[in-house]
Image (tube, helix red, strand yellow):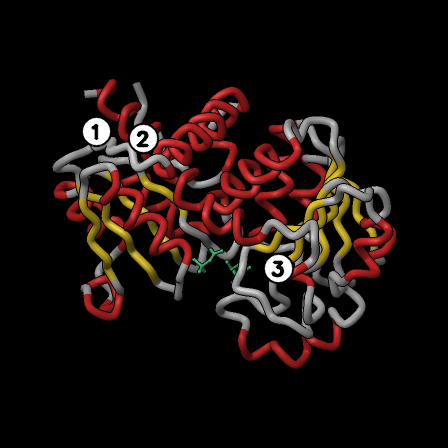
Amino acid sequence: MALRHFLTLRDLSSLELQRILDRAQELKRMQHSNTVYQPFAGKVLGMIFEKSSTRTRISFEAGICQFGGNAIFLSPRDTQLGRGEPIEDSARVISSMLDIVMIRTFGHDIVERFASYSTVPVINGLTDDHHPCQLLADLQTFQEHRGSIEGKTVAWIGDGNNMCNSYIEAAHMMGFKLKIASPEGYEPQARFLSEFADCVEVFNKAEDAAVNADLIVTDVWASMGQEEEQKLREKAFSDFQVNEKLMDLAHPDCLFMHCLPAHRGEEISEHMLDHKNAVVWDEAENRLHAQKALMEFLLNENLKKD
Ligand code: CP
Ligand code: NVA
């Protein structure tokens, strides 16, 4: 059986994705009731971070520890990765000593190259093109608050990059309609959009996407690595703020999510995180439970292979 990785959401089947979401809920209940569950004692997770992180780092590290395993934090600054050792050589060495690896980096090709030389499962902890772990948490959060997302309408307001791309894949896999509103020039890549034309619609006004939505989601205007574009983007995105007025156009039960970190006064209004339908804190916590379910799936799949 081929080694399983999680580089984009589509590395899972829709059925596997649903099972992981259900399992995440079960693991959450267990964690909340202080049930000790340590099936992965002795297993070691490597975490390579080429970009900053609060949620991803803590949720992966806490998750593997709760499972009885351990995590090693690897920063390129302190490893030979930062001094130009090829990804392929690094992947062979690192995976020979670890049981599972998570990588947060820039180009998506870096996780693909690492995975193709790795002998253990590789998880994408965010690239410039995808953030599939966040989608596990978002889908779990929707399910926990509103039930199945199938047939619902989700409005993505903002940049058509990593988070948006993962939402497009989720719409395809989970059967919801995705309405994307991005400023001109910041839409998702046309090649990606045409592949998913059946479930995705693109607008150039946030209000048009928000009408009757069951979930409104946004993200920062300048992602990690785009800091020098901040001023330019503030101008381009100024009509794409998620605020109380925008929420009023949506379905009365419409949830609001944001992967965080958030910038009040930019992509969200000052009090948007306190909106009665904002579920951002559950969404952040669910990173832990969803990724535990993911690691359990990948580690067990890899054991089957041995
Ligand atoms: N949402 C998210 O990935 O957060 P961090 O950048 O803090 O990991
Ligand atoms: N789009 C953001 C997501 C942060 C979790 C970024 O890439 O910085």
Label 1: which secondary element:
loop
Q: Nearer the viewer, residue 194 or 235?
A: 235
Label 2: which residue? 296
Label 3: which residue? 219
The image position of residue 194, as x and y in percent, is 72, 39
The 10 Å Cα crowd at callout 1, few under 14, some 14 to 19, many 20 or more, is some
**Amino acid type of disc 1?**
Pro
The residue at label 3 has a CB less than 8 Å from ligand 2:
yes
User: Is 68 positioned to the left or the right of 223 in the image?
Assistant: left
N-terminal-most mark, 3 or 1: 1
The circle drawn on residue 55 is none
The residue at label 1 has a CB less than 8 Å from ligand 1:
no
The 10 Å Cα crowd at callout 2, few under 14, some 14 to 19, many 20 or more, is some
- Residue visible at 60% across and 65% down in the picture: 220
The 10 Å Cα crowd at callout 3, few under 14, some 14 to 19, many 20 or more, is many
Q: Work out how far the residue at label 2 is from the one at label 1, CA to CA, in angstroms.
A: 9 Å
**Amino acid type of disc 2?**
Glu
- Label 2 or label 1, whichever lies nearer to me, is 1
Q: Do the residues labelled 3 and 1 touch (CB within 8 Å)?
A: no
Label 2: which secondary element:
helix
